[in-house]
Image (cartoon, rainbow, N blue to C red):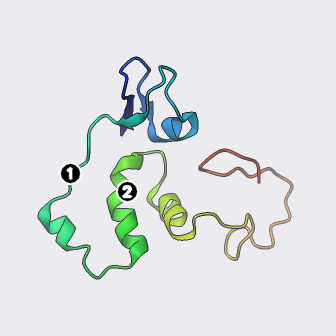
Amino acid sequence: MRYISTRGDAPELTFDEAMLTGLARDGGLYVPAEIPQMSHGDIAALAGLPYEEVAFRVMRPFVGESFTDEEFRVGVKEGTERAFSPGNYEGEKRPGLYHCKGCGTAL
């Protein structure tokens, strides 16, 4: 998924580049170059699903390859989580630096 400026005079960016850039350098907003389409069947299949699953299915096409399905599911379901939440490096003692997948901030 590529993102373009509403003013048309800034470079195309990926989802993560656009997310971290904010406003385009020409003062425009970054928007998808193409709007993903959902079929009637895809939309009907959302009925009765938990909110997190609906959000994942609707938003997934907009993030492209910036996140794996697993990374994006965590972002949708958890929003943010502690760096050492159960199951994620719990009990990890090796020295190292871990970074947020969304913004690159050291954890």
Residue 100 place in picture, x, y as percent: 66, 52
- Would you place residue 31 above or below residue 53 in this image? above
List x then y, in percent, for residue 33.
Answer: 31, 34
As drawn, which residue projects farthest toward the left? 40
In percent of width and height, residue 85 lies at: 71, 72
**Residue 56 quadrant:** bottom left
Check if mark 1's residue and mark 2's residue have beta carbons within 8 Å.
Answer: no
Say which label, 1 or 2, has the lower sequence index.
1
Q: Which residue is mark 1?
A: 37
Q: Is residue 20 left or right of residue 68?
A: right
- Residue beneath the point at 48% across and 45% down: 66
Label disc, if present, on residue 53 of the rendered structure = none
Q: Position of residue 71 (x, y in %)?
A: 52, 59
Element under disc 1: loop
Q: Amino acid at mark 2?
A: Met
Amino acid at the residue labelled 1: Gln
Question: Eyeballing the image, is 70 above or below 30?
Answer: below
Q: Residues within 10 Å of mark 2 (few under 14, many from 20)?
A: some
Residue 7 appears left or right of 93? left
**Which residue is located at x 49 percent, y 36 percent?**
18
3D distance between C-alphas at marks 1 and 2: 11 Å
Q: Is residue 72 left or right of residue 58?
A: right
- Helix, strand, or loop for circle 2? helix
Q: Which residue is mark 2?
A: 59
Residue 32 drawn above or below residue 89: above
Q: Is residue 87 left or right of residue 31?
A: right
Q: Residue at x 33, y 63 (%)?
A: 57
Q: Where's the C terminus, which quadrant?
A: bottom right
Of 87 and 85, which appears nearest the observer?
85
